[in-house]
Amino acid sequence: MTVEHVYPAGPSSVPPDLTRSTQTYRLHAWLAMAGLAYTWLQQARWQEAIEPLDVALKKTPSSMGERIAMDTLRVRRMLSYDGKAPAAGLERHSAALKYYATLESGAGLEPGTDTAYYHLGHGDPNLAAKEVARSSEPVQRILRLAAASDGADPELIAAALALPITEGIDADTVLASLALAMREQADAEAYITAFRDTQNPDAQRVLDFISIVRQGGSAAEAEQLLNGVDVTVRAQAYSAALVLRGKHAPKEWRIAANRLLFIPERPYFVPANPEITAGRDSEPGVVRTPPRLAY
């Protein structure tokens, strides 16, 4: 397809099939809608993102369906009043969402990793850690998430910090582990290096966010650093802030971390009351949960 085909020189040169629903036309339309959705997601504009996400998912290639379905549910949860949005129509696109649903319900889980995730997601990080310890092949990432959770025992925290940096560190655990090390005044350099090694293009901005939070700086200033950051990285940054500041972190960040991330992607954080009364534009990028149900 040539440039002239997409952008004709004038009315007399418009190809007769310009808007016919060819495979190429549909692909371009899907890419445009997906691109628009992720632009809104990077700005935490949940209401604007949901429609292009829904449109993109209907036409998405199977190789991309998993990510879009997961992100659609993240946004549905953000737009719901209490974070309990249904996965209607999404699980057929995503094996991960089906798995996460079983971790939420606990139905038919085998002892070990899955049961540990269930305990973690339902507010008992210490029991989750004990379940990991009983496993013949312990999944140390669960130990790291449990240690960074609200209500973690000192012994659990010490055990997680004693793990080698090569164990249990991945994209979903590295920032929470970094924040835990900082909070407990342990050596954090290995975690900073591990995060930089992910080659995330926004790594420095996220580290600057964490630095502001650690120093007790302005939440609005910190929030600005996350504008344009991938939605899951944004949520992981919020998780790090909660580990560092606990109940002193903005409620909006607690709500967003719990709704944007699924059980295996975050520590356990005690849920916050969804009532938020601040004005819509008082803090750019901060999550607002309207008192109406979107799903």
Image: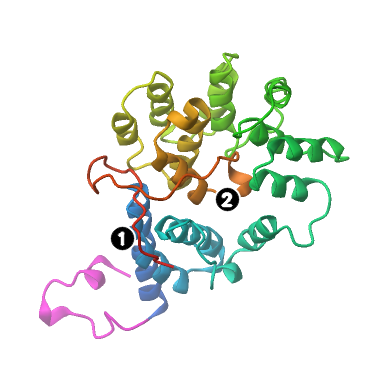
Q: Work out which quarter of the rendered image holds the C terminus and state it.
A: bottom left
Q: In x, y percent, where is residue 205?
A: 38, 30
Q: Earlier in the sequence, mark 2 or mark 1?
A: 1
Q: Nearer the viewer, residue 265 or 16?
A: 265
Q: Work out which quarter of the rendered image holds the N terminus and state it.
A: bottom left
Q: Marks 2/1: CA distance? A: 22 Å
The residue under label 2 is which amino acid type?
Phe
| Residue 228 higher or lower than 293, as above or below | above
Q: In x, y percent, where is residue 142?
A: 70, 38
Residue at figure coordinates x 50%, y 38% from the top left = 236
Residue at figure coordinates x 69%, y 41% from the top left = 124
Residue at figure coordinates x 79%, y 38% from the top left = 132
Q: Mark 2 points at which residue?
A: 262
Q: In x, y percent, where is residue 62?
A: 56, 68
Q: Which of 215 and 229 is in front in this view?
A: 215
Residue 48 shows which numbered tag?
Answer: 1
Residue 26 shows which numbered tag?
Answer: none
Category of crowding for the residue at label 2, using alpha-carbon neighbours closer than 10 angstroms: few (below 14), some (14–19), many (at least 20): many
Q: Which residue lies furthest to the bottom in this view?
A: 16
Q: Which of 119 and 211 is in front in this view?
A: 119
Q: In x, y percent, where is residue 226?
A: 36, 37
Left or right of 219: which side holds 6?
left
Q: Which secondary structure dominates the residues rendered in magenta?
A: loop
Highlighted magenta segment, given as a residue range: 1-21
The residue under label 1 is which amino acid type?
Glu
Residue at figure coordinates x 53%, y 48% from the top left = 261
Residue 120 picture quarter: top right
| Residue 5 higher or lower than 209, as above or below | below
